[in-house]
Amino acid sequence: MGLILAQILTGLANAGALFMVASGLSLIFGVTRIVNFAHGSFYMLGAYLGWSLMQVLPGSFGFWGAILLAWLGVGLIGALVEIVILRRVYAAPELFQLVATFGVILIVQDLALMIWGPEDLLGPRAPGLRGVVRILGEPVPKYDLALIALTPLVALALWALITRTRFGILVRAATQDREMVGALGVNQRWLFTATFALGCALAGLGGALQLPRGGADLLMDFTILTSVFVVVVVGGMGSLPGAYLASVLISVVGVFGVSYLPQSTLALTFVVMVAVLMWRPFGLLGREEVAGELGQVGPPEDPIAPASARMRLLVGMALAALAALPVYGSPFALVLATDIAIFCLFAASLHFLLGQAGLVSFGHAAFYGGGAYAAALLVRHAGAPMELALLLAPLIAGGLALGIGFVALRASGVYFAMLTLAFAQLLWSLVWQWAGVTGGSDGLIGIWPARWADSNTVFYLLSFALSVGGILTLRHAAHAPFGYALRAARDNAPRAAATGFDTRALQWAAFTFAGAMAGLAGGLFVFAKGSVFPNELEIARSFDALIVVFLGGVKTLSGGWVGGAVFEAGVDWLTRFDYWRLALGLVVLFIVTLAPQGLVGTARALWARVRP
Amino acid sequence: MSALLEVRGLSRHYGALRAVDGVSFALAPGDIQALIGPNGAGKSTLFRMLMGETRPTEGEARFDGRRITGLSPARIARWGVGRTFQITGTWASMRVIENVQTALLAHRRRGLSLRGFATRLYRAEAQALLETVGLAEVAERPAAILAYGDLKRLELAIALALEPRLLLMDEPTAGMAAGERGELMQTVTRIARETGMTILFTEHDMDVVFGHAERIMVLDRGALIAEGAPEAVRADPRVREVYLGGGLDPEALADA
C-alpha cells in the first residue's frame, strides 16, 4: 500500500515538468498553429540557465530566485526567436515552420555545448527540502512533495490567466478563429510573440524546476520532446486540463513501468497512448482538429508528366557517367558517392510520402534504422548472407510501417506527425534498452558485405544500382495510377472518397511503400559502414530527411534526391568543423526564410525568368 | 415499381438542434427530383448522410434494396451513387483531363495499381466525357486555373465517370452565369434520360428547379413539408409561407 502510494507520488512529481512543457506547447499551437519542435530546447535552456544562476545566487532565496530568473530568461529568448525567425514563416506552409523550429534545435544544441560543455551537470539540491519524508513507511523526497504542490498552482495561475484576463480572452479567441481576431483589429504580431514567449517560459520553468531531480544534459531536449508529444496527443492538443490529466497519467504509468516492467517502460506508455487514441482519436479532452495543411499551402503544384524521350536520354547519360565513377573517381569519392546514393534513396522515400500522399511523417528514421537493424540482426543472430539481409530489410521495414501506419493513420495532420515521431522514438528506446540483442548503445559492428561485393567499387555499384532502382520505382509510382489516386486523396479527400477511392487504404499503402524503400536504404547503409548504432533511428535522422525534402522542394518530383545529394555532400564537408550543427541550423533557417520553394523549385523559377 | 433509393426516418440531431428530423421519401429509377428549402433547412446534412459522410442519429437509407447507412463514402460510391459538392471538389494538381482519367481509375478499381502511366489510360473515354460537359477545349490545362463555372462542369464529368445509377448534386449551378445554368442542367437531364440515371439535386435557383425537376421535395427546419409535381408544390400554401417567411424572394417562386 505504502509502496504504491509512494510510486503514485513519484509519478505526480514527474508530471510537474512534463505538464509545464506540454501546456506551453499546447498554448503555442492553439494560437499560432505552430508545433514548436524546439520546445524541448527551451526546456533544456531553462535547466542550464537555472543551473548557472544557482551557482552565483546564494541560499534558499538564490535557488527560487534562479528558477524565477530562468523562467523569465527563457521567456525572453522565446520572444527573440519568435520575432527574429518565426515571424517570417507564419505565412509559409505548416511544414516550413516545423523545419524552422528544427533549425532552432540545432542552434541551441551547439550553443549549449559551447557555453556549458559536454559534461552532464548535477543539479543542486533545494535548500530546506533536502531530505525525505516517510509516508506509510516509504521514503518520499521532500522536493517531490513541493513539486506536487507547485504544479497545480502553476496550472491554476495559467488557468486564471487564460480565463480571467484580456490577454487570456485574446488567446482563447485566437485559438478558436485566428482570422477573426485579426479582423477585429487585435495586433496579432504581439499576441503571437507574447503567447510564444509565455509557452517557452513555461518550458524553461519546467526545466529549472526539475534541476534537483535530474540535472541538466545535452540530450534532455529530445528526451522530453517524446514524452511531451505523447502527453499532448493523449490529452488533446490545445486543452490545458487535458495536458495536466495526460501528464499525470503518463508519468504514473511510467513510474509503475519502471518498477514492474523495467525493460519496456516506454512500450507501456505507448500502449496507453494507442489505447486512448483508439477510443478518442483527438485525445482525452481534445476537440476534433481540422486536418493539417498537408504541406500543400500556396498554389497547387504544376501537373506532372512522364519524362520526354530527350529527358530520358539525358538522365540515362548522367546515370552512365555516375556508374563509371570507379574509373575516374578516387577511393574517397567512391565511399562518399555510396553514402550519397543511399541517403538519396532514404530522402526520396520520404519525399514520396510527403509530396504525393501529403503525409508529413516526423519519424521516417524508424524505417531507415529499422531496415538497418533488421539487416544487421539477421546477419548477427541468424547468420544470414548479405543478399538475403538486403532482400528482407525492406520487407521488414515495410511490415513495421504497416503496423505503425495502422495506428498513426487514425489521426491526421499534426497529430499524425507527432505519432510517427513518437513511434520512431519507441523503436529507438527499444534498441537502447534491449542491449542483449541489439548491442544497445554499442551498436552492432562487423557487418560486412559478401566477399564478391567486398571492394569499394563493387559495393558502390551495388548501392548505386539499388538506390537508382528504388528512386526510379518511387518516381514511376507517382506517375502510375497509384500516384494519381494518392494525389486525388491529398488534393481533395471528400471528392476522392465520393469517387470511390478508399483514401485511408491508399495512404496506408503509401506509408508502407515509403517505409519499405527507406528500409532498403537502411539495409545498404549497414553494409556500407559495417555497423549500425541507435542514432540511425533517432529524431535527428528523421529530421535530416525532412530538411532534405524541404531543401530539394516538396512540390517537385526530383526534390527528394536532389536535396539528398546536396545535403549529404554538404554535411560531409560541414562535419569537419566543431560546431557544425550550428552551421546547419543557420543554413536551414536561411533556406526556410529565403528560398522556401527549395533548390529544385527555386532553380525552376529562375529558369522560367531567364528563358526567353 | 421498386424504389432505387428509399429513405426512412432519417434524422441528424446536434444536441437540441434537429438539423434533419425524420425524413422519409423514395426515388424510383429515372426520377429527376429536386430538394429545395431555405438556407439551413438541412439539405446538405441530408446529402451528407446519404453519402455516408455524416452518420445519422436515427433512420436508414437503402439503395437498390441494400442498406447504405453506416457504409463509408467510398463504398457507397462504388455501389453506384455519384455526388457533386456544394463547394466544388476537383483535384487541383492535375490537368483537367487527368481529373476525369483519375475518376475512371477509381471506377475500374485501379487506385493501388503501379502498372502503366496514368496519363495514358482511358484518354478517349475521358475526352468523350469532357465533350459531354463542354470542356473538351481545355482538357490539357491545369484544373487549378479553371473558372468556377468550368470547375462545376469538371466535377460533373468526374461524377459521371463512375456511371452512377443515382447522382446526388448539391447546388450544381451555384456560382455559374445564368445562361450556363440551364445548359448544364439540360446536359445532366439528357444523360439521365438516355441512361436511366436517377437524379436528386438541391438548388436555390427556382428557374433551374422548376425548369428541370420532375418532382420537388421541400425541406424546412429539418422536416419534409411538401412533395409532388412542380405545379402542386408551387401552389402549396405551406411552401409559400416558408419562402415568404424565409427571406427568399417570393417573386422567384411566383415567376418560375
Image: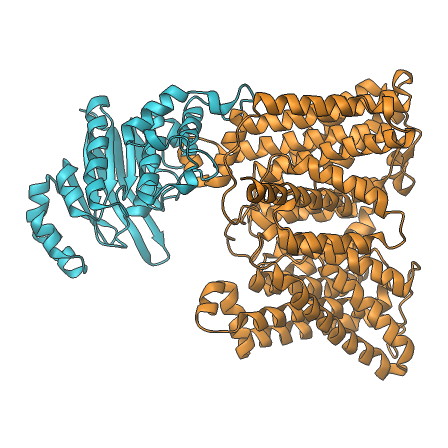
Say whether residue B209 is visible. Answer: yes
Q: Residue at x 48, y 35 (%)?
A: A488
Q: Residue at point 21% right, 25% down?
A: B2
Chain ID, orange in image: A
Residue sitting nearer the eye, B130 or A293:
B130
Is residue B236 something that shows in the picture? no
What colour-coding does the image apply?
Answer: by chain
- Say which quarter of the image contains residue A439: top right
Residue A352 screen position, x and y as percent? 62, 35
Q: Colour of chain B?
A: cyan
Residue A219 image position (x, y, % from top left)? 83, 55
Q: Quadrant of the N terminus of chain B?
A: top left
Residue furthest to the top: A452
In x, y percent, where is residue A18? Answer: 72, 62
Does residue A89 appear to the left or right of A579 in the view shown? left
Question: In the visual, does A595 lie left or right of A116?
Answer: left
Image mark count: 0
Above or below for A283 versus B137: below
